[in-house]
Image: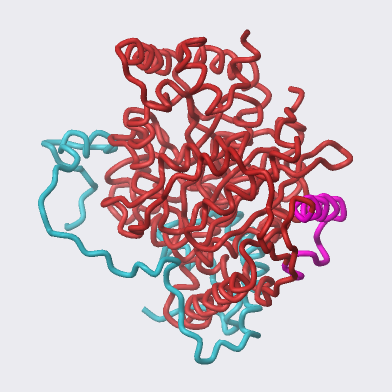
Amino acid sequence: MAMQYSENADRMDVRYVAGLARMALSDEETAQLQSQLDDILAFVGELKSLDVEGVEATDGASGNLVAWREDEPKPGLSREAALSNAPLARNQQFVVPKVIE
Amino acid sequence: MSKELIELGVGEAADALANKTVTSEELVKALLDRSDALEPSLNALTWRDAEAALTEARAADAARAAGDTRPLLGVPIAIKDLLNVKGQPCTAGSNILKGYVAPYDATVIERLREAGCVFVSRTNTDEFAMGGSTETSAYGTTHNPWDTDRVPGGSSGGSAAAVAACLAPAALASDTGGSIRQPAAFCGVTGLKPSYGRVSRYGCTAFASSLDQVGPMARTVEDVTQVYQVIAGLDAHDSTTVDQPVGDCLEEVRNAKDLKGLRLGLPKQYFVEGLDPEVEKLTRAAVEQCRELGAEIVEVDLPHTQYGIACYYILAPAEASANLARYDGVRYGFRGEADELQGMYESTRSQGFGAEVKRRVILGTYVLSSGFHDAYYLRAQKVRTLIRRDFEKAFADCDAILGPVTPTAAFRIGEKSANPLQMYLGDIFTVNVNLAGICGLTVPCGFTESGLPTGLHIIGPAFEEARILTIGAAYQHATDWHTRRPKI
């Protein structure tokens, strides 16, 4: 799917991006979010003025990158407990609207 | 008797219970009565079940009578409504989790339960901990006990207000960009954000996983230390926790008298335009107090301080957009009506999330999207490295850093809610600590002319919680700001 942003990278198509995040916005919400997100993007865009050439990226705050442990089965949530908060469950399974025609 | 009971701290309550001068049932009853009286004006709590709490308290009393001597047996504690306590609701301040009942205990809860704590109430939070005022909670704003027209801060505003107003001797909270330290400052209580990796987040509703950290709030450093030492340490359920001994610094904290031999750094970037003159004056007076206690005060340089908020408001929303993808109406929480799957997702999320959460999920989705990832997300990760290095360099020259927690004291309810960027700018002194993964402590350090509390920020290197707690305790032993209570 082609990206449908406006030419100015600091002005996002709010309704389109909301759709990527599986949210539908009302016209009123879209208008308000558009102006707020324009301001926020302009503000966070100030990082573009910093020279980060050659700086490595920090992708976590801990130096503990990969924690290994033995792959042993351990008790987890019972099926009943796992389903206890489901909006809709039947035959010990989550029920969702039809996906395939 | 009732007034004395509600004012007992964690250590005092533990002692009174051990000496059998009070029962857990009496203590819990007093706190519940206090909550009934004050909640109409505070709204610090999202949930409490008197009968369930009293049953737990009676069980603790019975255990004690049978010879159980666990140190926190029967001590009540309030829990931020973001942490799973088995059998209690956990809403994260969101409509999307209305009706959710936790099927398991978070690791921090399991540890407090093993120590004997009674879970007396759940505290209000900004929705998914996104906010600095509790105004984004789906369950209404919490009011600051020092001035109910003002916010308690956030996101852990409910925990801070509850501790300040003596609804509980201590509370658990969480801090992604300042959510323990800022409300602690606004409400005049003590709050610790532990180092990243120090405390397990298993069972804590995720916001931004490279930044989130759980920590305690209480009315003294001693009480904060006691709760912190129970919840901290390696957990097989959270692979980011580190295998470093937590140690026991409680005696050190209790006996802290001076700051001799310590070098404390004062960053010049923390005393700049935008810092309220009254807050600056009170912070500088607290620094002066530390000097009088024997500390050497040195200037340190944190040159990338000003980029912290921009960096944080790229990385945190990016992580939030991924973490909150789980709210799809299938496994738990609210489900919107629709006759096909895609429509169900949209209807669930559009109705279930509030405005601030939508704003951050959209922002996060954008900065991670193809074509913008490198310009925003990757660049912010590099700036994060620069911020982390600033602290590493500073800590080569000092033992801990002092500064303000917030640029102003508590603001009025509604004052910033229409302007999210304005709200974000208030996080200037707290977010960098999360970005660097280090630890920070708020201790009360005075009051403005209009009677609002302010906090001193004590920042330490990663896994040096014992050091900043001891510094905070020495400061509290020389001052009485932390003993003042709001007249509510």
Judge by depth and name the residue closer to the eye, B445 or B90: B445
* Rendered colour, chain A: cyan
Q: List x then y, in percent, for residue B97.
A: 41, 39
Q: Is residue A31 magenta?
A: no
Compared to residue B207, the image places residue A7 above or below, namely below
Left or right side of B15 for B258: right
Q: List x then y, in percent, for residue B18.
A: 45, 17
Compared to residue B205, the image places residue A4 above or below, namely below
Q: Residue at x 35, y 30 (%)?
A: B113
Query: Which span is picked out in magenta?
Result: B267-291
Q: Quadrant of the C terminus of chain B?
A: top right
Q: Residue at x 53, y 91 (%)?
A: A53
Q: Quadrant of the N terminus of chain B?
A: top right
* Image chain in red: B
Q: Main secondary structure of the magenta part?
A: helix
In the image, farthest residue toward the front: B261
In the image, farthest residue toward the bottom: A53
Q: List x then y, in percent, for residue B43.
A: 61, 28
